[in-house]
Image (cartoon, helix red, strand yellow):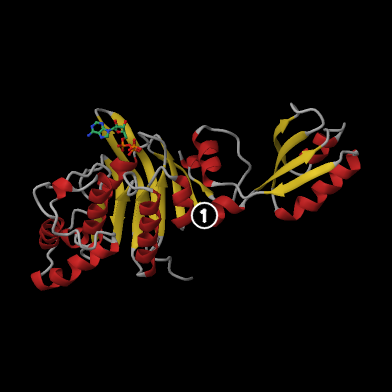
Amino acid sequence: MSAPPPRIIETQDLRKEYRGRAVVDGLNLRVLPGEVFGFLGPNGAGKSTTVKMLLGLVLPTSGQMRVLGGSPADPAVRAKLGFLPEQFRFQTWMTAEEFLNFHGRLAGMKADELRARVPQVLKTVGLDGRGQESLGGYSKGMLQRCGLAGAILARPELVFLDEPTSALDPIGRVEVREIIEGLRADGVAVFLNSHLLSEVEQVCDRVAFVKEGRVLQQGSMQELMGGVIPVGIRVDAIKPGLLDALARLGEVRHTDTQTPGRAEIELWLPEADAVPAVADAIFASGARLHALTPRRPDLETMFLDLIEDRPAPASNAAPEAARA
Ligand SMILES: Nc1ncnc2c1ncn2[C@@H]1O[C@H](COP(=O)(O)OP(=O)(O)OP(=O)(O)O)[C@@H](O)[C@H]1O
């Protein structure tokens, strides 16, 4: 039997209560080496609390967690972690270089190592040439870039990024995505909290959806998105028997017949191979086919389905809620 792959993060029934109320409630997560892991959920789902527990900043009420094979309370483990908090507040009287040198020294880096590394990370985050300016004069986006530089400064093995692009313009967001991809290429694992699902979709290898402190589903992007194929259908009219025939092939999620001479149907198929049978069913019903468009379900649709408890066709991803 082959050994299970090493885990960068593993939690078992992790729980945090505040004043008797569970805000993280039996959380089971695993993050593998070198992967970018998206941690998604609505406001108040317990994402930041989870990150703080994984960083050793908040003590769990119960449950187990291992980070980089040990406890985040262990300074040797903490030295290998990077963190960009959602609510960053930096020492505004420092220059960016002073700020990074200060954090580098706290992380145990030597002065000559920092002399080479600080300009390097400033360049990575797009603050080349701005390192001698005081943080008090930085824009919010520049501060966030500086925080990101601090998070990657000591060459961590695992970086937590809590909403890392909330203050950034679209160009900055693309740049942060490239930085995350660069980290992955260097074998660094990234734990990403973000509400920007299109961003997550582009960069994450695996994601977990959380609600009310519990993981509803986690899996690779392929597992989460490969299970079903939504197909958009446009016909002149929905002829008798057509919807029944389509329902035998998949799930009819939506119909729109408001425009005369035109009807739209959204059908979710279990596999792409069923598309020709859809066309056959439409022709057999006598309807005229104007469009038949297979689409990939996007992360936002999946998120809304899960979070709002809308019925979604089964996918291959591991459902976690069943463990409740
Ligand atoms: N120190 C605290 N004391 C009491 N309640 C807290 C504390 N920290 C967080 N909470 C509560 O725990 C719940 C989860 O908060 P958390 O910040 O982890 O959510 P989140 O998923 O990160 O939300 P958001 O997406 O809005 O940042 C919220 O109801 C919050 O009010």
Where ligand 1 lies, by image quadrant?
Answer: top left
Residue at point 52%, 37% (across, down): 304
The type of residue carrying mark 1 is: Met
Residue 58, given in percent of the width and then of the height, sits at 22, 43
Q: Where is residue 288 in the image (x, y as percent from the top left)?
A: 86, 41
The local secondary structure at tag 1 comes to helix
Residue with the mark numbered 1: 221
Along the viewing direction, whichever of 72 and 256 lies nearer the viewer: 256
> Picture coordinates of residue 284 (x, y %)?
90, 43
Disc 1 residue lies near ligand 1 with CB under 8 A: no
Write the residue at 25% across / 47% down.
85
Q: Is residue 1 left or right of residue 31?
A: right
Location of residue 116 by image quarter = bottom left
Where 125 sits versus 63, above or below?
below
Determine whether 196 is above or below 239 in the image: below
Q: In which quarter of the image is residue 18?
A: top left
